[in-house]
Amino acid sequence: EQVQTATGTGKGVFVGTVPLTTTLSSSTYQLKDATRGGQSTSDLKNRTNGSGTLYTDADNVWGTGTVSSGQSAAVDAQFGAAATWDYYKNSFGRLGIKNNGVGAASRVHYGRNYVNAFWNDSCFCMTYGDGSGNTHPLTELDVAGHEMTHGVTSATAGLNYSGESGGLNEATSDIFGSMVEFSANLASDTPDYLIGELIDINGDGTPLRYMDKPSKDGGSADYWSSGVGNLDVHYSSGVANHFFYLLAEGSGAKTINGVAYNSPTSNGSTVTGIGRTKAAAIWYRALTVYWTSTTNYKGARTGTLSAAADLYGAGSAEYNAVAAAWSGVNVN
Ligand code: ASN
Ligand code: ZN
Ligand code: CA
């Protein structure tokens, strides 16, 4: 029998009801997307190794929208991989993490009570735990975009995962994870500058990270200082997340999709935002053209200024906004 591409319906834990591109083979549907480099999702069945079992289904309707169906987390993962593929393709013409047309695999139900998700270059795959009590899967869209962006960073600048370059690596994942969320624009996951706002990882409904004022998480740096590279990379990332927010949206108070932000600058200056599309284009060009494994915050400023000059002209409003946003986070 012929193998063909089909359109199914997914009901995820976080994504709501979404279309999924699947594969029909021998009267059975597979959670595999031939239109996006063969990206697929498999079930680890609480194991912590192996490639798992590819999800299959008889009627091409996947999951129920709650965690009691193991397929629901798989729907989120498969949709997240598709949305990330589409974001990089539509925004930058990038075809997959390595820009070679090859899709990434996703694995869900990793271990038991595993409260994390991760990218691994070796398996070229994304892995998600089921969270606390095995009832809080980590399969939120910005997390998918975050983790898969670790693959993009590895395939491009290769930012070392420690010191200031590690903070830039983490921020790159938060930035593009959030841009994936904005691009998908789901009713059940309205786009924001918060990371992990739906997975309730803190148990009190607060998100994992805040881009407008990173210190709201209790650990992240809002501004550069000489010791910032000694912080955990998920905290030194705050400087760059804050830069990106200032560049895209500007300083001060602003409400976006019902979420109130208030982004301060280190020097009391006012930054006028250039919008997230231009801000993301500048960050992507710096990542893929100018930065290397050892780029630090000073180099990030230089690289984004070069990228802005390429895209919009030296001395353009966009170029000047990049300079002002870095100065607003004390990278001078
Ligand atoms: N979720 C974490 C991250 O992407 C996983 C890790 O710490 N390796 O940074
Ligand atoms: Zn990360
Ligand atoms: Ca978010």
Image (cartoon, rainbow, N blue to C red):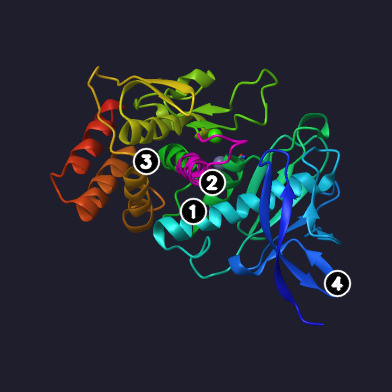
Residue ID for mark 3: 276
Q: Which residues are magenta?
A: 172-191
Q: Which mark is residue 27?
A: 4
On the image, numbered disc 1 is attached to which residue? 87
Under mark 1, the amino acid is Tyr
Does the magenta stretch mainly form a helix, a strand or a loop?
helix
Residue 109 x, y percent position in the rendering: 80, 45
Q: Residue at x 75, y 33 (%)?
A: 136
Task: From the viewer's perspective, tell me whether residue 281 is left or right of residue 270.
Answer: right
Marks 2/1 in contact by CB < 8 Å: the verdict is yes
Q: How many numbered badges does the structure rendering display?
A: 4
Residue 176's x, y, as percent?
Answer: 47, 45
Secondary structure type for disc 3: helix
Q: Is residue 297 above or below residue 307?
A: above
Q: Residue at x 22, y 21 (%)?
A: 269
Work out how far the residue at label 1 is from the one at label 4, CA to CA, in angstroms: 32 Å
Q: Which residue is mark 2?
A: 184
Q: Residues within 10 Å of mark 1 (few under 14, many from 20)?
A: many
First in sequence: mark 2 or mark 4?
4
The amino acid marked with disc number 3 is Arg
Vertical order, 244 against 49 (above or below): above
Q: Is residue 113 left or right of residue 20?
A: right
Of badges 2 and 3, nearer the viewer stands 2
Assign a secondary structure to mark 1: helix
